[in-house]
Image (spheres, rainbow, N blue to C red):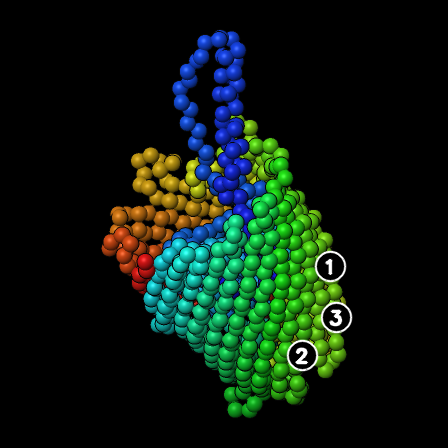
Amino acid sequence: MIGAVTDGVDPGTQPRRTPRLHTFSLMVACGLAPVEAWAQQIDAKSPAATELDAVNVVAQPYDAQRDETILRVVMEKEELARFGDDRLVDALRRMPGVSVREAGPGRRGGVALRGLADGYAQILVDGQRAPPGFDLESVPMVMVERIEVIPSAVADASTQGIAGTINFVMSSAYRRQGGEVIVALGNSAGSLLPSASLSRTLRSGSRTSAIDVSVSRREYDTRIRRGEKVLDSFGNVVEEREGSRVIAGDRSSGSIAPRVALDLARGGSLEVRTFLEASGAHRDTRSTWISSMDTAPSVAQSNGSNAIDVVQMQSSLDWTHVFASTARFSSRLAVGGNRERAHYAESVQADDGRLLAEEVSEARLRVSGWSSSGKYMPARLGDHSFQSGWSISDDQRTERSERAFSGGGLRVADDQSFQAGIRRIALYSQDEWEVTGRFSVYMGLRWEQLDTSSRSDDGEVVNTSDVISPILQTLWKLPGNKQRQVRISLSSTYRAPELRQLVARPYLSLDNGLMQPDLIGNAGLTPERANGVDLGFEQHLAEKAKVTVSAYIRNVRDVIRDDVQLEQNRWVSRPVNAGRARIWGVDAAIKSSLQRFFKQAPDIQINASLAWNDSRVSGVPGPDNRLASQTPWQARASADYKVSPHWKVGGSLSVEAARRSRTSLREWERESSRGELDLYALWTPRPGGARVRLSSTLLLASDQQSQRYVLHERGAAVADSRRRNELLVRLRWELPLN
C-alpha cells in the first residue's frame, strides 16, 4: 500500500457486489417464475401428471460497472500495462476523461478530470485520501492493481472532488501465486530511462506474503524559447526581451513494498502493508535574456541548480471481522511520513558580469501523520445494504528553511521556517436499496471537518471548515432490455484550499514582475462548494462491451482564483474567494470489437471517447471567462489486435484542444493543442514464457506553446514560451514467475 489513510474505506475489505447468493437467487427466481405459474395452471386443469422438458437457467455474468448503482470506470492491470509504462502517471494519460498536466521538464503535473485544474479531482489510494507528500511520480506500475474513476460523489470516501474521484487500487497480498520480473530501457532525445522491477507472491495455508521492488532512473534535457513584451496604455512596446532556457537533470528512485495477510474465521482477514521509497533529483538551469528598450540592447544570464533528496514510508494494518450473522466490521490504522532535504541556488548576471540578483536557500522538511478509519456493515436487511463509518487523521508538517535573497532593490536574509498541521474528522452513513429488479437507489450522507493551522515567526493562523454532503444516485434498467440503463446522480462536493494558499508568509520572486510575481497566502480562504447533477445512458453490448453517453453540471460558489496587485513597487499574487462558477459538459464512449459492426473485419478491440467541457465564472467578463486551465474538449481512441498466438500490437491516439481562458479581470491564459500517439508490439515466443514489449510515444505537435496576457494600470504585459517535444522509445523484457 502507498499512503496513510485519512478518509473513505478500503476496497480490499469492502463487500463488493460480486455474485452473491441473494443476487443469484433473484435471477433464478425471476427466470423460473413464469415456468412455475404455467405448470400450476396445467396441474389445476388436468389430474394427469405432465412431464416438462428440462429448463436450464443461466445467470448472466455479474459486471460491477454495469450492475452497481454507483458508477465506476475501471481500468485493470492488464490494460494499464499494454504500453509498457513504468510509472503510474504515464498510464493515466490513456484513461477516458483524464488529463495529466505538465508541471515542467523532468516531471508531470497533477491529474485532472473533466478538463479542470488538478485541484478539482480527488485522489484516493485504496479508497483513502492520498497521504501527505504523495507523488504520482513515485508510484511504479508494478504496485498498481487497477484504477477507478468515480464521476460523482460517494459517502464512504471524502466528497472533496468537484470534478470526480480517481482511486488507485494498489496490489494486495491477496493475489494469485507467482510473480514477474521486468527490465526496461527507454530513450528520449538521447536521455536514458532504465528501470527494473520484481513482484512475487507466495501462499502457505492461511498466510499470503507478497513483495514488490522497483528501481528507475530518468534523465531529461529540455530547451525552451521564451519572449516577453511590456506595453504602455496606448499599446506601444516599451520593453521587449527574448530568451532561451536549457533544463537538464535526472531523478533516481528505488522502492520496496512488502505485504503479509492472514485468513481469519468466516472470511475475515488481517493484513499488514508497508511502502518505503528513497529518491534523489537534480536539475540545472541555464537561461539567457536579450532585452531591448530605447537604449542599447542588454543581455542577462541566469544559472540555477536544484537538488532534492526524499525518503518516505507508509504502513497500515487492516482488520476485517465477519460475525456469525454475516455482519462485517472493518478497520484500518495507518502511520507514515517523509523526510526531504532541498538545496536551491540561482543567480542573474548582466552581460558585463555584474550581479543583478541572487537567491540561495536550504530547506529540511519533515511530514508525519497517522489515521484511523473503519466501517460497520450489518447483515443485509431485505433489499437494503447499510453501512456506517468514520475516519480521523492528523498530519503535521515542519519545515526548516533559510533563505538569502537580493535583487530588485531588496536584500533579505531570514528564516522561512514554519510548522503546519491538518486534522480531518469524518462520519458517514449510506444505504444501497434494490427497489426492484430494474431500479436501485444509493443514498448517503457525510459530514467532514477540516482544521488547518500554521505557525511561524509572523504568528499563528488557524482555519476551520466543515461540510455536510448529501448524495443520491439511481440506476434504472429500461423496460424490455436490461442492457439499456439510465443513471442519475445528485451530489454536494467541495474543494478545500491547499496549505500553501493559507500560509501568509510571502515567497519573493527573483525576477519580480507581472509574469513572475511574489506569492503570498490568504488565511481567510474558505472551501469552494458545489452542488451537481450527473445524467448518463448506457447500452451494454456484450461482456465488457458498451456505449455510454453522459452529461453533468456543477454550480460552484466561493471560487478560488489568484489576484495580482502592485504593492510597494513589487507585484504580488494572492488567492482570494471571488464569486461563483457554473461547470458543465457532455462525454461519450464506446468499447467493443470491430467485428460487432463489420462481420468480415479482423477481431480488433476498439476503445474511443470524446468529452466536451465548459464553464463560466461570475465576476469575470467574457468571452473565455472559464475556470483556469480548463480544456474545452478531448478525444481518445485505441485499438488492440492479436495478430497470432505470439504477436499482439496496438496503438492509442489522444488529442486535447487548445485552452484559452480569462482567469481574472486583467489576465488571460492560452495553451496550444496537444496530441499524442502511442504504439506497442508484444512478442510472446511461447505461452507462459518470457515476453518482449516495444513501445513508443510521439507527441504529434512539434512544439508545445503557451501564452499569458496581463493588463495593469500602466498598460499590459505579454509572455509566451515554446518547448520542443521529443520521441520516447522503450524496450521491455518481462518474465513471469510461477
Label 3 belongs to which residue? 462
Q: Is residue 419 above or below residue 58?
A: below
The disc at residue 680 is: none
Instruction: Give the residue type that dot 2 points to.
Output: Phe
Callout 3 crowding tier (Cα within 10 Å): few <14, some 14–19, many ≥20: some
Callout 1 crowding tier (Cα within 10 Å): few <14, some 14–19, many ≥20: some
Between 632 and 105, the one nearer to me in the picture: 105
Give the mark nearer the N terminus: 3 vs 2: 2
Callout 2 crowding tier (Cα within 10 Å): few <14, some 14–19, many ≥20: many
Can see residue 626? no
276 lies left or right of 201: right
Instruction: Give the residue type that dot 1 points to.
Output: Asp
Give the mark nearer the N terminus: 2 vs 1: 2
Between 309 and 374, the one nearer to me in the picture: 374
Among the 4 quarters of the image, the one containing residue 241? bottom right
Q: Using the numbered discs, state the Cα–Cα distance from disc 1 to disc 3 in whole angstroms.
A: 14 Å
Tags 2 and 1 touching, CB below 8 Å: no
Label 2 belongs to which residue? 418
Image location (x, y in percent) of residue 569: 71, 79
Looking at the rendered structure, the secondary structure element under dot 3 is: strand
Instruction: Give the residue type that dot 3 points to.
Output: Val
Label 1 belongs to which residue? 466
Q: Using the numbered discs, state the Cα–Cα distance from disc 3 to disc 2 in whole angstroms.
A: 13 Å
340 lies left or right of 602: right
